[in-house]
Amino acid sequence: MEARVKTGIWVSMALRLGDIAGRPGAVLRKGDPDSGGILCVLRGREGLQVLSQVRDSEGRPAWLRATGVAPVDQQAADAYVDRQVKRDPDLWVVEFEAPTLKPPFEGTIL
């Protein structure tokens, strides 16, 4: 059984990594501090991209480009986030400045 980091601790770590990398972030919505899912909004030069926390086929943590490979506008990103929050009220939403649409933390992106 793989040990899992509590969501609130993971979010704090990701925000700190963003600050260190010069890509500041902010919590847009707090969810369950122990086991809530995470949406990561990346604000790039050409638009936004929303990453959704998922598991790969072997059960390892990964990120899915939930709004697609191409950047989207603010309205499309907000609509996606709103739909997901309605489905999962424990969801966290974190946003980072990410000019190249790469998150400031390590992770597999599917």
Image (spheres, rainbow, N blue to C red):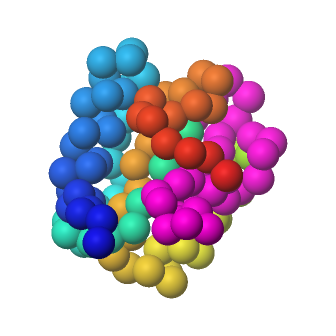
Q: 9 left or right of 25?
A: left
Residue at the extreme right: 70
How many marks the image carries: the answer is 0
x 42%, y 23%: residue = 23
The magenta stretch spans residue 54: yes
- Residue 9, above or below 53: above
Q: 51 left or right of 10?
A: right
**Res. 64 in view:** yes
x 23%, y 58%: residue = 5
The magenta stretch spans residue 61: yes
Q: Position of residue 31 (x, y in %)?
A: 29, 68
Residue 21 occupies quadrant = top left
Q: Position of residue 41 (x, y in %)?
A: 53, 46
Residue at the extreme bottom: 87
x 25%, y 39%: residue = 13
What residue span does the magenta drawing correspond to?
A: 43-71
Q: Position of residue 75 (x, y in %)?
A: 68, 54
Quadrant for the N terminus, please.
Answer: bottom left
